[in-house]
Image (cartoon, rainbow, N blue to C red):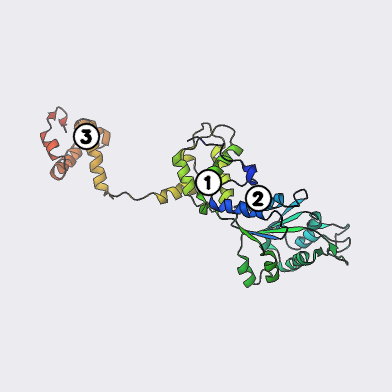
Amino acid sequence: MQTNHTQWHAADNFGMVGNSPAIRELLDKIHRLSTNDSPVLITGESGVGKELVARALHTTSQLRDQVFLPIDSASLVGSLMESELFGYQKGAFTGATESKQGLVRAADGGTLFLDEIGELPVDVQAKLLRLLQEGEMRPIGGVKPVKVNVRILAATNRDLEVEVKEHRFRKDLYYRLNVITLRIPPLRERREDIRPLVDLFIERHAIHEVVISDDIMEVLEAYDWPGNVRELENTVRRLVALKSNPLVRFEDLPSPLLNAAEARRPWPDEMLPLAEIERRHILRVMEFTKGDVTTAAQVLGVGRTTLYRRLKDYRATSDYDELAMDAPQSQHGMNF
């Protein structure tokens, strides 16, 4: 099967590809929120595309012509987190030789996307809560609060209810963010989206023609994709990289997919003992050599005496008795 790139146009759905009920519902919610500038909490596992949804929310909002500023909360380390977000005044601490406005003020008038908001320490959460409630913030070392008009979009792969119970996330901030929640389902819950996503990633990354058979596609669609869309894209990039021929083969698949495919393979209806496998193979070789024992023994890598002994046992126990007993002798031995 050659991949088909005509059925999906990512730009129509803000880059979100898929026709599963879950994706259609998600897109519908994004469009319905186009006139609402309230905070939105986006939840989902790593790699499902939370920033893509945040950008879609911004693109459809009244702030579409303003700045969209994504921030990876996990990348803001320790004491730098507060100063990076809220800025500081000159002389606020050692090394603060000049004032810095911070990322929140840089997004003033637009949208601030806080990815992995569960990584924020509690003291920074308090300042974020004030920003949501009062529309103002105070830089480190500042005396007067600064008014900021910014829409907050937040995302997390954590269960914030558990984080609240464990006192790692402020309850009041959680309730403030949780007014509108969009959950992005993992890829294993919308397997029908895998094929169009593969088409999209081949179109995005392949330099030459790429052909994926139905057998390979079945493996891709059956895999659970713990890394979700991000893992799928990385896998497709690996499959198309440095290929000298267009056909993707099983041996091209990464080991996690091969192992999963092997684990899903059903057991045969008849589990054969090793001796029965040997018997069937010997008789198949005898049939191929037209009963020439010498040639068959050479093919099998055994001595003629050993092969005669096996054939004698098979004549006594197998369904090939009449064929073996009635067959004429050749100059090399017996024929089947």
The residue lying furthest to the top in this view is: 331
Amino acid type assigned to the residue bearing label 2 in the image: Leu
Residue on which the image places disc 2? 52
Residue on which the image places disc 1? 194
Say which element carries label 2. helix
Residue 52 visible: yes
Q: Judge the density around disc 2: few (<14), some (14-19), many (≥20) Cα neighbours within 10 Å.
A: few
Query: Considering the image in quadrants, where does the C terminus appear?
Result: top left
Q: Nearer the viewer, mark 2 or mark 3?
A: 2
In percent of width and height, residue 288 lies at 24, 32
Residue on which the image places disc 3? 286
Residue 242 lies in quadrant:
top right
Measure the alpha-carbon separation of dots 2 and 3: 64 Å
Say whether disc 2 or disc 1 marks the residue closer to the N-terminus: 2
Measure the alpha-carbon separation of dots 2 and 1: 17 Å
Q: Nearer the viewer, mark 3 or mark 1?
A: 1
Amino acid type assigned to the residue bearing label 1 in the image: Ile
Measure the alpha-carbon separation of dots 3 and 1: 48 Å
In percent of width and height, residue 297 lies at 23, 34
Say which element carries label 1. helix
The residue lying furthest to the left in this view is: 326
Q: Is residue 262 above or below residue 175?
A: above
Q: Is residue 309 above or below residue 97?
A: above
Amino acid type assigned to the residue bearing label 3 in the image: Met
In percent of width and height, residue 278 lies at 25, 43
- Residue, x 23% and y 42% (percent of image)? 279
